[in-house]
Image: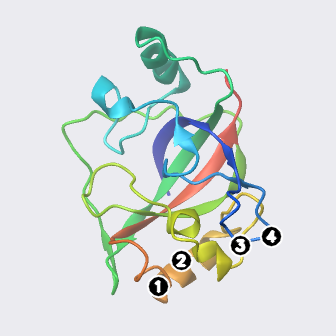
Amino acid sequence: MIPAGYMAKRVSKKPDWLQAPQVTDIYSVAGCISEDFADYIKFWKHNSHWLFDSPEIIRSAASENSIRLEGTSLFYYEVHEKEFDGESWRPFEIESSFPTNVVVPARKQLEGFDVVTFSVGTSPECSPLSCNSLVEALRTNEHCLFSSFEETEAHVSNGMFNESEPGPYRIFSVCSVGWP
């Protein structure tokens, strides 16, 4: 897994339309349900994974744009070295024009693994477990995440995500970290 960066999110409770009794809230990488702290891409402070290298950069972007971070949760992500194109795993290219120097947190709590679409190849798009209700057919934890990398990779390799959103699909570890 490659350090990918951080995001501050407004974690949402499980929507009523999502029929997954084990899920209480959504920790997805995508911002479809649990929204990112802002429409951050226009700030141009993200790294090559379209995330942030440190919590301090998020704080700076929020401050410069009068965005309140109260009520947000801070997550740290790592991404698998390969993406799945619907048939096979292959290495993916990152946007080399953005410098990346992710500060790995001293303490992190692994919450699980998410599958994220990258049809455009840049920023995280959808998390089909929550966005497309795949959680209703697949077993996840209370945060709508898989418990292990091996389980996640098996579901992706078996084509379970192929009919959800356009791929390719990348696997992310989702870790909660406290605000420093």
Q: Residues within 10 Å of mark 2 (few under 14, many from 20)?
A: some
Q: Residues within 10 Å of mark 3 (few under 14, many from 20)?
A: some
Q: What residue did someone put label 4 on?
A: 21
Label pair 3/4, CB-CB below 8 angstroms: yes
Residue in front for this viewpoint, 2 or 155: 155
Which image quadrant for residue 46? top left
Label pair 2/1, CB-CB below 8 angstroms: yes
Which image quadrant for residue 90? bottom left
Q: Amino acid at mark 3?
A: Gln
Label pair 3/1, CB-CB below 8 angstroms: no
Count the marks.
4
x then y, percent, for residue 20: 74, 71
Tag 2's secondary structure?
Answer: helix
| Mark sitting on residue 19 | 3
The first of marks 3 and 1 along the sequence is: 3
Classify residue 133 as left or right of residue 180: left
Task: Give the Cα distance between marks 4 and 1.
Answer: 26 Å
Q: Residue at x 50, y 68 (%)?
A: 128
Q: What residue did someone put label 2 on?
A: 153
Q: Is residue 129 above or below residue 67?
A: below
| Mark sitting on residue 157 | 1
The first of marks 3 and 2 along the sequence is: 3
Nearer mark to the viewer, of 3 and 2: 3
x then y, percent, for residue 45: 34, 25
Task: Give the Cα distance between marks 2 and 4.
Answer: 23 Å
